[in-house]
Each structure stands twice: as C-alpha cells, then as structure tokens.
Image: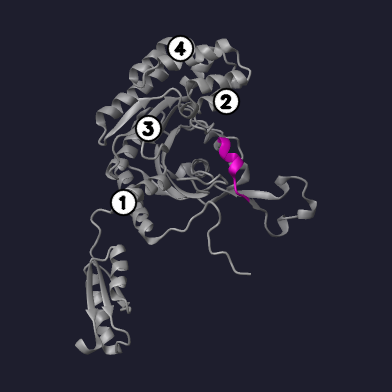
Amino acid sequence: MALKKKPVTGMKDILPEEMVIRDYMIRLIKETYATFGFSSIETPCVEHIENLSSKQGGENEKLIFKILKRGEKLKLAEAKEEADLVDGGLRYDLTVPLSRYYANHANELPAPFKALQMGNVWRADRPQRGRYRQFMQCDIDILGEPTILAEIELITATTTLLGKLDFHNFTIRINDRRILKAMAAYSGFAPESFDTVFIILDKMDKIGLEGVRSELISEGFAEESVNKYLELFAQVTPDAQGVAFCREKLEGFLDAQYADDLMIIMNSVDQIKGADFKLAFDPTLVRGMSYYTGPIFEISMDEYGGSVGGGGRYDEMIGKFTGQSTCACGFSIGFERIVMLLMERGFKVPGSSRKVALLVEKNMPADKMITVLSEAKALRDEGVQTTVAVMKKNKKFQKDQMTAEGYTEFKEYYVDRM
C-alpha cells in the first residue's frame, strides 16, 4: 500500500514562499519586542496532563492531543480509566506552560519578568480558514507586575508590531472580566450561572442582541433579568465614557477602581500609540479562557472577519503551581492568521537581499566548475544570496520559476565560452 503524501488533517506543509514571510515575521517580532524589554524563552511542547486539565483552559481542554504512557508504565490490560493510560499531552496554548516555567524558575528570573515565547501548539479542533490543529503562537507576558503598566506595555508593544507589518485601521477591543461579572450580578443572575450567561453573550457578534435574548430565555433565565441585562449593552458607548457609565450604573456591584483603571489604560494607549488603530470598549468581550481575572483585550481586523489575537490579566494561575499569588498579564497574536493575511495581500518582505542565480551548462568540467563555485563564494561573502544550478532544456521556464522565487539576476556559463 502506498504511503500517504498529504499531511494529517488540520496540519499543513509550508512552502518556501510562505517560509520567507514567516521567517521575516519571527525576526521582526523578536526585534520589536526586545525594544520593549521582553526576553525570549522556550518551554517543551509536551506538558503534564494534570496541568493541561486543571480547568483553566476553558473549551481548549476538550481539544487536547493526549499522549499514552510509554514502556512498562503502559498497562493496557489493567487500565480502568483514562488516567491509567495517559500522563501527558501536547500543549494547547503557551500560557499554562509559561506559568509552570515561572513557578519552577522564579528565583532565577528578574521581577517583574517580561517573557516572549513563540512555538507550535496543538488543538484537536475543526479546521477552517486561518485555523489549524497545529499552529504557531506568539505570546508576550509580564509576570510580577500588579499595576496597569503591564496592560499598557502589552497593548503598545503588540500594536507597534502590527504597525510595522503595515496593518492599519484594526481595532483593539477591551473589557474587564470584573465588569462582565458586575453587569450579570446587577441584572439578577446568580454567580453560578455566570459561565452560561457569558458563553451566550460571547455569540453577540454572530447572533445579535435578539439572538442572545432568545438563547438566555431558552436557558430558563428570568425575562426580567434578561431584559435588564441587555438594556445595559444598548446604553454603553464603545469608548472611555462607556466605562464611566458602567462605573456609575453598577455602583455596589463593581469596585470603581476597576473602571478607573480601564479608562487610564485606554487613554494612555491612545495618547502614546505609534500605529494606526482604534481602541474600543466592548462590554460583550468575554475571552473563552476561564483563567482571566481582570482586563481582557482582543484584536479585530475587518479583512479577516474575526479575532487575530488577544489576551488579558490572569493573576491566579501561577499561584496554583506555587501556592503564592503572582500577578500576570499577557497578549498573544494570531501568528498563522497574520501570515495568511500578508500572503493574501501579496506582501513582499522589505529590504530583501539581492538574489543571484549562476546557471551552468550540463557536464561542466571540474576546473571550470570550480571557477563558477569560486564566483558564487565571492558573492556570498558579500552577503548576496546566490544559487548555482544546472541549465535545463527549457531555460525560459527555469528562469521564470526562479524569478517567482525572487531571483532577479542571472549569469550563464557554457563549456565553450569559459
């Protein structure tokens, strides 16, 4: 039986044209985030299954690629439940591994610690445009910083990067999980029902206000509470004044300092931003991860039709590893989706190096070939990307192919002309 040549469903092979953009993005990410003081780290792709299944990853915990125990530890005949078979899994994000990493190395790291982490993650998700089962994530996190300086730095660094990639008119949507909870409590929902309410609210951009109303009522919530809840969203404006409205309206349910902090974040970012984007208060923004504890944010781009990044504050996760409270806040960009958008717009890497092709006639004698290879070496020593290739019969087609790869200079060598 012939072996399968296509990649596994939800995963993809990456062709050279895309790799050029990916490599450029990785370089630009590292350079840009380094100017903000972030240090690169790396964590293993395999994590303890207990960490991945700790009820902190929301819906992603249902999408874990689990790993069987190996060797003598794997006792199939004696297994009665999954825990008897599985002890690890492929990471579904970079935040849980980062929390374990920090808990393990906190004494060796500065405080606060600004981390940059890039790497593949895996989710057994349903593949679609811009969504794969294996994909690169790119996170920046600030650990040990309790003030809103962390949120301001993360949003500023991320938007600076997107500006350098020539993205304009995108939107950073921002909210606070504590405002979410206060709005639900004010409306009369019980705390134990908040998760259900938020899951439905998160569909607002797809099913609209009336769709949310219908689903909440069908879940058995009181119509009075539902109406009171949705009236709030109808009154909130998408700016700092909307936050001020929540502070006043939710008095007794929301600590005013949380609203004040969110307004300071918005005003500060707006005044110092170096990229062309909008910052909008969005009280319907939920973010699926249950580990978020404070401000949350998401990047929306019209050309994608959805989110291309997000993050927020997660002050309680690291403490679950150490027993000690540690402030933490992070922002992740959708690396794969941004690469896809760049390719769809025909993005060309700026300042690409000169690319030269030296084409030699077939059966070139060794001494003459050395002359060609020496010339190639001299060009490479100058920093010129140079390839040596044997001429094909259809030389025009060969040059067209190489031109598509970015080669702009060609030099031909024939046996009888050297």
Q: Amino acid at mark 4?
A: Leu
x then y, percent, for residue 269: 30, 29
Residue at the spot of label 2:
195
Chain part drawn in magenta = 58-66
Q: Residues within 10 Å of mark 4 (few under 14, many from 20)?
A: many
Q: CA distance from mark 3 to mark 4?
A: 26 Å
For the stretch drawn in magenta, the main secondary structure is helix
x then y, percent, for residue 350: 25, 53
- First in sequence, mark 3 or 1: give its number: 3
Q: Are marks 2 and 1 in contact (CB under 8 Å)?
A: no
Instruction: Give the residue at the far right of this rendering.
Output: 78
Q: CA distance from mark 2 to mark 4?
A: 19 Å
x then y, percent, for residue 84: 73, 48
Q: Say which quadrant the C terminus sits in.
A: bottom left
- First in sequence, mark 2 or 4: give its number: 2
- Tell which of 346 and 372 is nearer to you: 346
Q: Say which quadrant the N terminus sits in.
A: bottom right
- Tell which of 11 and 69 is nearer to you: 11
Q: Are marks 3 and 2 in contact (CB under 8 Å)?
A: no
Disc 4, SS? loop
Q: Are marks 4 and 1 in contact (CB under 8 Å)?
A: no
- Does residue 36 belong to the magenta stretch? no
Residue at the spot of label 1:
346
Task: Please tell me whether mark 4 or mark 1 is closer to you in this view.
Answer: 1
Q: Residues within 10 Å of mark 3 (few under 14, many from 20)?
A: many
Task: Please tell me whether mark 3 or mark 1 is closer to you in this view.
Answer: 1
Q: Residues within 10 Å of mark 2 (few under 14, many from 20)?
A: some
Residue at the spot of label 3:
150
Residue at the spot of label 4:
250
- Does residue 59 belong to the magenta stretch? yes
Q: CA distance from mark 4 to mark 1?
A: 48 Å
